[in-house]
Amino acid sequence: MKNIIKIVFASIILVLGLAACQQFEDVATIDKVTPLESTVSLSLDLGNAPTPSQFNVKFTNYADRFELSKVISPNGSIVVDGLIPGIYTVTVSAEMAAEGFTYNYSGSLVNQKIVTDNSSLSINVQASKSGALVFKEVFYCGSRTPTGGSYFRDQFYEIYNNSENVVNVRGLAIALLNPNTATANLPVWPGDDAANFVYATAIWQVPDDKDYPVNPGESIIIAQMADDHKKSNLNPSSPVNLLSAEFETYVNTTSIISDNPAINMYMAFWPTKMPQWLTTVFGGVFVIYFPTEVINANNYVTPIGSATKCYKIPIVDVIDALELIGNPNQINLKRMPTTLDAGAATVGGTYLTKSVARKVKETKNGRVILYDTNNSTNDFEVMDVPTIRRYGAVAPSWNTWK
Amino acid sequence: MRKIKYTYMVGASLLTLFITQRAVAQDAAIKQTSPASIELLKAGSLWMNSTNGAGLVLDNLSYFSDIKFTYGIKDGDYKLNQEGEKERLFGVSSEGGLKLGKGYAWGGFAYSNEAQRGTLFNTAIIDPQRGMPYYPIDPNKSDWMKQTYDLSMKVATRPFWDKVILGAQADYMTKVGAKQIDPRSEVYYYRINVKPSAIVILGNHNIGVNFEYQNSIETSGTINSDGQVNQPVFVLRGLGNGYEATVGGLQSLGDFIYTGNKAGGALQYSYSVNNLKFLASGNYTYGVEDVISSPTKPKKEGAIVENVIEGKLVALKTGDNIHRLELSYRTENLDGIEYVQELDNTYEVQSWVVVYSSIRSNYKEQEMSFKYDFFRGADHDYNWRAGVSAQYKKNDDIYYMPESTEMIKNLFLGVNGKYNFSLCKNCNILIGANLVYKNNLDGEYNYGGAEPDSYIITDFMTPDFKYMKSSYTKIGGDISYFTKISKTGKAGMFIKAAVDYYKPSDRDDNRIQSSLSLGFTF
């Protein structure tokens, strides 16, 4: 018996000792951190766009909340030093006015490991004219009721004509992309060309029944439910009355939901239907685009290892994109390709009665022009009171119920 | 789980009492023990406070034992943020030692239940002052409820061949705590420390050696009772650096698990001639503690590597009176390791992979101390005692990139005394007083991180630094009444009241700590 006790005791000590040895060995060769250098060069793919004289390069290490910016010439390279070893998002941007257009230049590397000294980074830069239609303001996080409950039916998406030309939004689609919320577990998509698409879990379309022209400086409101949300049976604490919205994502009438004056959008793709189109209050990822062919809901795809039905949208068709996240820390969980949105916007929580709105860049001939650099972190700001048609935006003339 | 803890507590108490009752039965000629006699017993021992359990035999200790119930409160704003505005502690502790033939055994048990009211900036670690830089904090003022169980033992064999003594020392501690406001947490901590030891006797010279191994685990999980409101937290990485996270909703902060191992050893040398004794000792320990979050998809939050070197010299002169002198030096060097990780998102894998690791911070602490105590009358109880002490302590911390530094040098000077008034044949009153002056010699905190205006720096790091840098005067006093409670046995009882008052030199706040104890000796 004594021998058994000795053996058991010795075995416990041995196991613990081996565990300790392994732990000691794991840290034995770790040295003090040293700053790193990295060389950045650009690969320009500007098409017919003019070449700006310089580009801004920004290194962002979200884990360490560390940022470093430099300026680079189009055909040169720069050595960036003082980098903390880590995972970086490296963005290149520039803006240039020429030939009556505003050109945006962007390129990026996401989740770029910089853990060795003297690394070389080559960033492909593309040019685009500033989009005509942009997300102007999005209220996604919901609001609190007077008794502290959660209310989410007052979500809205305002889309603004930021150009100097009339745009017809007939057939315009708004899509919520997969995954619904920020996560480190990004879905893996099948196919060699998977990176050329974004994948929607729901798509709503402006009806293709007639023209819906939107003049420069005008905006359209897409409401989850285009009602006066301040009504006593809804949420008197809601910040918005959406009766003047142009469109709503109406599904069917319930004791709460009614068919309002707004034009009902067409449910083009939505495999998982609910009484209302509630997008996540944690912050979804949205694109607007004009489909080049009729959306056939049967042509869905699923991520590898998942049964979630999604619809492929070619990235080249996307007019504007907006990534929303639950809080600033989730910026390193980006879902949107950085060619569409190099950053993300957030109100920082749920049911805060706050919205994100695009910042004003300038006012030209009385027309407000909003920032559109394809980086929501820079382009958007948080608004304490969600408001439709902020900055004097006007409803289209065909909206007779406004 | 609770049943096991109670069984453990009751069992340990009964064991201690059982041991001490046996001791009384074994040696009826021994005089009655009192708190003062236990103090004297320990002051006259060289090895009792060393890390070598085998040395107990050389101290030639007699039996002693006590059990004590303590109720303590702390109140006042002169404190660290993470301490409670008010704290209440109820504790039971017991210790006892007895001869086992020519060997010796000592055992101790302590239980405490602590309520900390109005703490700040600690979301999920049971002891934020234990030197771990990686843990989440939040700005919500909250109560903490904590319980601690601590079981210790030392044992020494008889001298084999009059030359070799074998011994061992072990300590098993568990703590459990819960934060009471969202984001709330439940924390479990366990630690076991064993020190096998041996001593070789060479006439008046004794050479000792002991090895040390320690294993510890702390786990904490955070939740919100109000699922509608997510709570922001900040995961510290040292000197105010870190990252923001959220408790609640999707991507909620995962559980934190701390796993530590420590190994080391010590050498001792003692020499005695007539009534003079010396003990010189030196120890070294090396420890590593890993921190991971979200154990189902483990992500390394960091690790610490700790090197501790200690040296100590104790000189003792016994006789009619006892003179005890202690000189000690301790240096601790702690490296904070951080990892760069990327998620391998391959469907079959989906785990965090370390792509780079480095030492991102370093924490150094140096202590030098001097202590002299004199006990007048060394028969059984002392008549009075007096002591002086001085301690120099320097902390020098750095976070390398982006660079932040914190340095503090403090000098502590103290005097203390106690007088033992005999009221009757079997009762006495012990009245003590102590004075400590903390003089800050230097101090500087420079934060070079991303957000110098965040609440982490303005409300947490900076006020705590000012607290640590401040000079203060502590005035303390205690009074205890002891009486025999058995006509035939050796049992005694004591009641003790103690107060410590802290008054900083350059601030208006203060802190009072007071306690009332009821104890029994056997």
Image (cartoon, coloured by chain):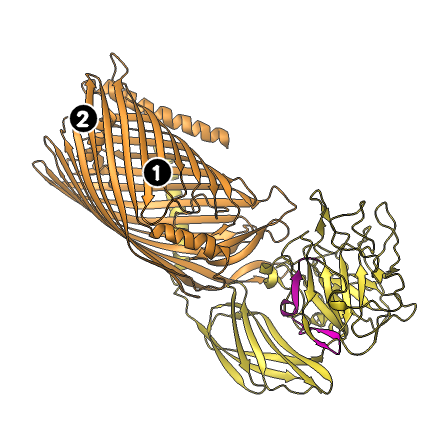
Chain colours: A yellow, B orange
Chain of the residue displaying label 1: B
**First to last magenta residue range:** A363-385
Q: Does the magenta portion include A375?
A: yes
Identify the element where label 1 is drawn.
strand
Q: Chain of mark 2?
A: B
Q: Which residue shows up at 19% across the image and 24% down it?
A: B421
Question: For residue A261, which quarter of the picture?
Answer: bottom right
Q: Is residue B305 magenta?
A: no
Callout 1 and callout 2 share a chain: yes
Q: Count neighbours of disc 2 (C-alpha within 10 A) and say few if under 14, some if 14 to 19, many if 20 or more.
A: many
The three-letter code of the residue at mark 1 reads: Asp
Rendered-image quadrant of the C terminus of chain B? top left
Q: Is residue B372 left or right of residue A276?
A: left
In the rendering, at what x and y percent does residue B114 appear?
43, 35
**Tag 2: amino acid:** Asp
Where residue B21 appears, as percent x and y from the top left, is 29, 20
User: Can you say whether B177 is above or below A380 in the image?
Assistant: above
Q: Is residue A14 left or right of residue A237?
A: left
Q: Which residue is mark 1?
A: B171
Residue A276, compared with residue A94, is above or below; it is above
Visible residue check, residue B102: no
Residue topped by disc 2: B381
**Where is residue A309, by image quadrant?**
bottom right
Report x, y in % for residue B117: 47, 38
